[in-house]
Amino acid sequence: MKTILSILLGISLLVSCSTSTRQEAGRTPDALQQRPSLEARTVLHVDPHRSLITILVHRGGMLARLGHDHVIASHDVQGFVVVQTGYAELTIPLELLTVDEPVLREQAGLEEEVPQESVEGTRHNMQAKVLQVDQFPTVQIQIFRPDHTGSALRVSISMHGVTHMKEAQADIQSRSEGEVVVTGSMTLNQSDFGIVPFSVLGGSLQVQDAVEVHYSIVAALP
């Protein structure tokens, strides 16, 4: 039951938005065709070794005690940031997502250990049956900083054939002339992709639609 409960846990990675469009498999999302010119700009590259995205997924229902909360993580974010305009592009390879790393569970306040067999089963089901990584291998994200200096962002996220737009807030710090650190969190919904959160027994045991996304992105000169 614990493994089944986790099938849908990573489906809404960074995709809670007010509008959406359906994209054909293998097609470049229209939003990515609106990239501003990068000529004569300072371009910082995302450092995947110092960047991290985590998704905290909660159990729900009257029988929630029979399941687990879970932490999904990406240590492999790729992309770049344009300093002058605040524009950024990120790519997240879904086949490299991890499930319930002990350190990340502890940091999230989830002390109960998940059996390794359940972790592997959850990851397999998530990759093959839910995310369908063979057909949709990445999440593509565009970030626009309208006033170039504030914390308000406009985010276009393309995943599993759907593109969403979202307004977001982030803490953006320049540690040096050649490095930027962006941190923040947001609450997202599985149903934004048309996914019905898993439930059994009339909803007495279920995966909550909303998930928590936390991110820390470090970009620096190559």
Image (cartoon, rainbow, N blue to C red):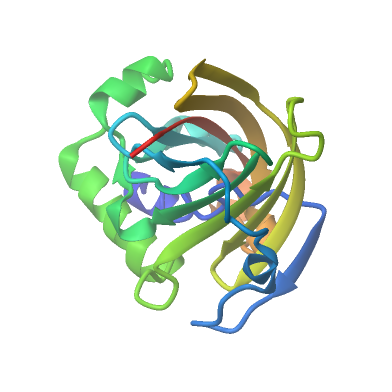
Query: Which residue sits at x=57%, y=18%?
Result: 173
Query: Which residue sits at x=71%, y=59%?
Result: 164
Query: Which residue sits at x=33%, y=17%?
Result: 106
Which percent across, then down, holds residue 19? 81, 60
Tally the marks. 0
Which percent across, then down, holds residue 42? 52, 41
Residue 70 in sight in this render: no
Which percent across, then down, holds residue 115? 20, 36
Residue 46 in sight in this render: yes
Which percent across, then down, holds residue 46? 41, 40
Along the viewing direction, whichever of 21 and 125 lies nearer the viewer: 21
Query: Which residue sits at x=66%, y=35%?
Result: 187
| As drawn, 127 above or below 152 | below
Along the viewing direction, whichever of 216 and 13 lies nearer the viewer: 216
Is the C terminus in the top left, top right, bottom left or bottom right quadrant? top left
| As drawn, 166 above or below 50 | below
- Residue that sits furthest to the left in the current view: 116
Q: Is residue 7 left or right of residue 98?
A: right
Q: Is residue 194 left or right of residue 74?
A: right
Along the viewing direction, whichever of 160 and 56 lies nearer the viewer: 160
